[in-house]
Amino acid sequence: MAEINNIAAVILSGGLARRFNGVEKGLQHFAGKALISHIIERLEPQTCKIFLNINRLHHEYAQKYPTIPYYSDKLNDFQGPLSGMLSGFEQIESEYLLFVPCDSPFVPLNLCQKLTTALRINQAQIAYAHDGERAHPTFCLLHRSILPCLTNYLACGERRVLQFFHSQRYVAVDFSEQPESFQNFNCAEQLASGQISHYFCKKPILAITGYSGTGKTTLLEKLIPRLSEKGLKVGLIKHSHHNVDIDKAGKDSYRLRQAGANPTMIACEQRWALMTETQTMASFETLVAQFADKELDLILVEGFKHEQLPKIQLHRKGIAKPLPEIDNFTIATATDYPIERENALDINNVEQIAGFICSYLHDK
């Protein structure tokens, strides 16, 4: 088999989304943007072109994604992923097509590379992802040679994806190092809760949020030792609005990083640090994933108030802005004045706040 180059990708969003009460799943919002927007961001570095497979709301998709071409199934009555795959080959001039579902915002960043390598090495027609426990056949790379068999399969009334794949030359590709990448939204309730956002790291996450001037860092500086005294191993992610440089100008690591080494690691007897240059801010999921293999009881997050995370809101009476409203992710509010709220905490009573956090972790 020759080298596989210039692969186009298709986001499959042609279903009826019955478990989403019939709404267009790909356009539903998660972490501030449509599910499909997350997927496009992760596919763009991997493929030469992206297509959408949609069967309704064409005008809405065209308005939201004017540069992304789309096609609809040629078979009527929403006949499933295989129908979208068949129509893709019928309407896109590509020898290979990479397919992904519209409800999985954490598509592996090396999906195309791993599937391509497996397809070529195994002289296969189909490569699909497997997370070590279960198959994910809608994350797949297909060769055009399957088209006649796929046409006949669907004409016989069959719709099962894996059954068809196993009738061809296929390979299941091991992604067990990143099973969280295949987490998907199955229903509207799951999307509303934001619970899937923590699958990149199965450690408990708790955000400390508040306006500038509420003393988030000061509180954390006192809170972390108290939590450590209670036996908790705590990690921290802090959001900065400034361009932070963690090594000093003129030092060896700074000079080598400025010379273009990316990433750059520096190590001494007491600590090590890995610095990675980025064109845009890394996604929260990418940042959290760095803690996945650490022995932690809790990851505290300062800032990131727009992420769908369990959080303790802070507010002080000296702040000109009003007390933030409670949302679905607020587990407590800490202030320096009395308030009528469930789980109202004293922002100056660090022992009380530490005790609340320990109880919260115990009840999870």
Image (tube, rainbow, N blue to C red):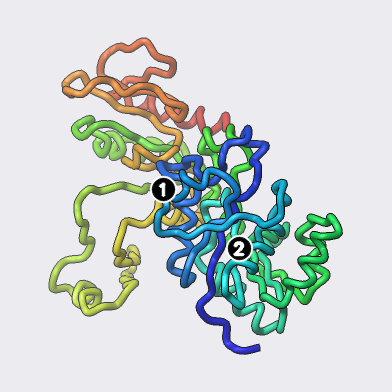
Q: Which residue is mark 1?
A: 64
Front residue (pair 158, 223): 158
| Furthest-bottom residue in this view | 2
SS type, badge 1? helix
Which quarter of the image is occupied by the N terminus? bottom right
Residue drawn at x 77%, y 61% is: 162
Badge 1 crowding class, 10 Å Cα cut-off, few under 14, some 14 to 19, many 20 or more, is few
Q: Does 333 sit left or right of 85 as displayed? A: left
Mark 1 near mark 2, Cβ–Cβ under 8 Å?
no
Give x and y (percent) for residue 89.
Answer: 64, 69
Dot 2: few (<14), some (14–19), or many (≥20) neighbours within 10 Å? Answer: many
Image-based side of 155 in relation to 312, left or right: right
User: Quick one: 238 or 57, which is closer to the camera?
Assistant: 57
Q: Which numbered disc flags the more N-terminal residue, 1 or 2?
A: 1
The answer to whether residue 320 shows anywhere in this view is: yes
Residue ID for mark 2: 99
- Image spot of residue 262 (x, y percent): 32, 74
Residue occupying the point 57% across, 51% down = 54
Eye-nearest disc, 1 or 2: 1
Secondary structure under the numbered disc 2 in the rendered image: strand
Instruction: Count how many numbered circles sit on residues in the image.
Output: 2
The amino acid pointed to by label 2 is Phe
Q: Is residue 130 above or below residue 203?
A: below
x and y percentages locating residue 279 in the rendered image = 29, 64
Is residue 355 shown to the viewer in this render? no
Query: What amino acid is at disc 1?
Result: Lys
Q: Which is nearer the eye, 222 or 308?
A: 308
Residue at horizontal 40%, vertical 59%?
Answer: 67
* Spatial CA span between label 1 and label 2: 21 Å
Q: Residue furthest left?
A: 250
